[in-house]
Image: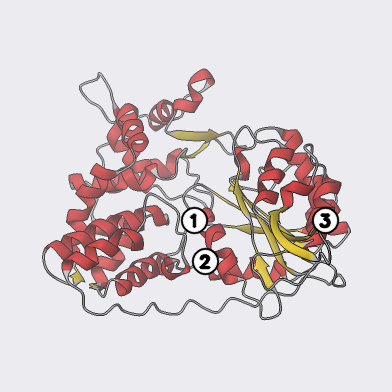
Amino acid sequence: MSASEPASTPPASEPAAAPAAAEKPAPDKPAKAAPPADAESRLAKLTSVFTPAIPVSTSAVFAGRLEQIQQVVDAIGQPGVHVVIFGEPGVGKTSLANILSKRLGSEKKAVVAPRVTCERTDDFSSLWRRIFADIKVARERAVVGFGASKREEQGSLDENVPETVTSADVKRALASVGRGCVLVVIVDEFDRIGDPEVRATFADTIKVLSDHAVPATLILVGVSDTVDGLIEQHGSVERALVQVRMPRMSTDELEHIVTRGLELLGMTIEPEALAHVATLSQGLPHYTHLLSLHASRIAIDAGVDRVDTPHVVQAITRALDKAQHSIKSAYAASVASRHEKNYYPDVLLACALARNDDFGFFGPADVRSALDRLSPGTYKDTRIERHLAHFAPAGEDVADGVLYAEARPQGRRYRFRNPLMQPYVVLQGVSSGRVTREMLA
């Protein structure tokens, strides 16, 4: 049995070989500028270039993350090594998973990269059966009759595994396919699996694959601050894992998203406008795509091929209007108050502007400092801790809070429960005139 998609994969009867080292990814080349186009063709292409609602799925519009891609590619070239990609929501983990197979070109072997997205109802067997269903295999079938020969048919790997899948079944199946290709199995949204036994079984499977140097690489992708938060490990599995943390994107990476997309549209952007989009995005590519989409559309409607700062300013209003309903409703609920003096909007804005650590956490002193920048002296008597407790309730209502609280020896630390809320709050502040570009610098 052998992988028959792509067709160039050798048959499984060949001697087993260690997985070929995938080529190192070449640095992103600047996208070719599209030829001058009329407004209709640009508008038709716009929504496939800037995609705030869905992860990026094509290399042509993917930008940045060269360091993380290199870490993954290096791991794939090492027998017995597997990968965990982790980070907060909205930083582009799924987009990276989508384009990985396109960055793993090998001159010697074909690349087979099945990808599955976890569901809350999945168990170990259901996940692997879906993975195996995406791996196409060729098999020989005898033809009945005089002088009969054999013919090749195409099927999928799930036809040859039992209903209840074990780590040993995974090892045998992947070993049979991986001999003839660069085999990479991507398991996205792994954090959605709530059953700790399933996570522990994945850890066991990683150890089995590693100990037997099975020519396949397992890549787990999920929301977490640490690998421990994603997978229940036993002592020796850590040596088999390359841990790739996806931080928020840098200003250069966010600007690359904008310029690359505009080049594909045959457009340019004013440097000040470019910096404004990157700053407002707060490291999250979703808002870079959202603001670029609306700013570009405004420029196209105006009959120009250059995005300027006024276009970005107008795009802020549209971005607020088109933001996810869950973000808008959570914001409205969190700042609502029956008191005449309602400081909730201002304190939440200060939370969004507060200095934070690498994991997005900030403290009450950081919030007070941000409030002083917003309006010096106005909030000196405001009880910051009481407002933070409102945004991060305890007990049964904890899931309703817009902030997540974590107790530490030096005091409670906070961060936005949904990272996409932070730029939304900042955009609200910019739209209302409370926040200037200087405050964001």
- Which residue occupies the foreground of this view, 16 or 341? 16
Q: Coloured how?
A: secondary structure
For mark 2, does the 10 Å Cα neighbourhood hold few (<14), some (14 to 19), or many (20 or more) residues? some
Residue 108 screen position, x and y as percent = 71, 79
Q: In this view of the protein, can residue 157 be seen by the observer?
A: yes
User: Tag 1's secondary structure?
Assistant: loop
Which three-letter amino acid code belongs to the residue tagged 1? Gly
Q: Earlier in the sequence, mark 1 or mark 2?
A: 2
Q: Give the alpha-carbon distance from disc 1 to disc 2, as whole Å.
A: 9 Å
Q: Which mark is residue 65?
A: 2
User: Residue under circle 3?
Assistant: 209
Q: Which residue type carries mark 3?
A: Leu
Q: Where's residue 159, x and y in %? A: 74, 47
Q: Earlier in the sequence, mark 3 or mark 1?
A: 1
Rendered location of residue 350, percent (x, y): 34, 42
The C terminus - image quarter? bottom left
Question: Hey, which quadrant is residue 269 in on the image?
Answer: bottom left
Tell me, yes or no, if residue 381 can be seen here.
Answer: no
**Image vertical order of residue 184 relative to residue 410, above or below:** below
Q: Are marks 1 and 2 in contact (CB under 8 Å)?
A: yes
* Label number found at residue 92: 1
Which is closer to the viewer, label 3 or label 1? 3
Residue 167, how many percent across, how many down? 83, 46
Camera-nearest label, 2 or 3: 3
**Crowd rating for badge 1 (residues with CA inside 10 Å; few <14, some 14–19, many 20+):** many
Asked if 245 appears above or below 263 in the picture, the reply is above
| Viewer-closest of 98 and 330 | 98
